[in-house]
Image (cartoon, rainbow, N blue to C red):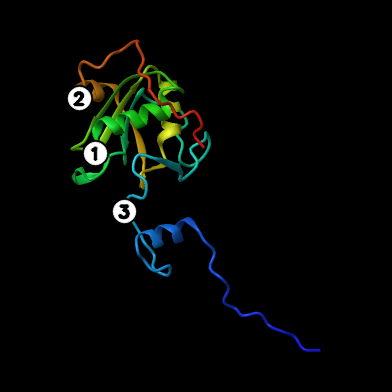
Amino acid sequence: MILVKKPLISKPQKTRQTDQCTRYGVSNRTVVTQSSPRKGIWQGQAFDTDPGSANSVAYSPTPCLKVRGMLQEEGSGLGGPAAREAVLAKVAHLCHILHCEAEVIAGVVYLKCATEDDAAVAFKNLHGWWYSGQLVTVKYLRLERYHQRYPDAPSGPPYLRSNNPIINND
């Protein structure tokens, strides 16, 4: 009996990366990397922030948050209004947000929620998520410090909303 061996080299499968490489005239064997693969897109969770996990806080000490990783340096990335809208789209339908301000120079989005519980919800849904190829990190900011920076920040309704809320955070 004679066994016929199939060749080890098979016909390449067509994938999105192959299509992109072909479109841009790059060999299929070349790896193309970009610093920000998808600008303005929430790309998934990097680590768990559910209660009890190593990256969660047992309780929310303040209603104010400082969000890093939303704004890119040198003006090449997301601008202040777009970062503000991205934060609101992600969490404004889940909790009550009183004030949201993006500081492009510092690369930070500041968020003031109505209560500590609302801040905990925002923290859980922002901290540890990938956004435009960058890891978003969140920390709590003392209320006094927030009011030093934003003395005219509201302390009651109306709450901020997004025009395009992201209903499914997965």
Left or right of 4, for residue 66: left
Q: Which residue is tagged 2?
A: 149
Q: Where is residue 106 drawn, in percent x and y?
A: 20, 37
Q: Quadrant of residue 78?
A: top left
Residue at x 30% of width, y 29% of height:
84
SS for dot 3: loop
Residue at x 43% of width, y 26% of height:
165
Q: Is residue 78 positioned above or below 90 on the image?
A: below
Q: Which residue is tagged 1?
A: 107
Residue type beneath disc 1: Gly
Residue type beneath disc 2: Arg
Give 103 or 61, whichever is nearer the viewer: 103
Left or right of 75, for residue 82: right
Mark 2 vs mark 3: in front? 3
Residue 150 is tagged as none
User: Mark 1 vs mark 2: which is more N-terminal?
Assistant: 1
SS for dot 1: loop
Give 99 or 3, whichever is nearer the viewer: 3
Give 86 or 126, whichever is nearer the viewer: 86
Q: Is residue 132 positioned above or below 167 on the image?
A: below
Left or right of 107, for residue 158: right
Q: Which residue is tagged 3?
A: 35
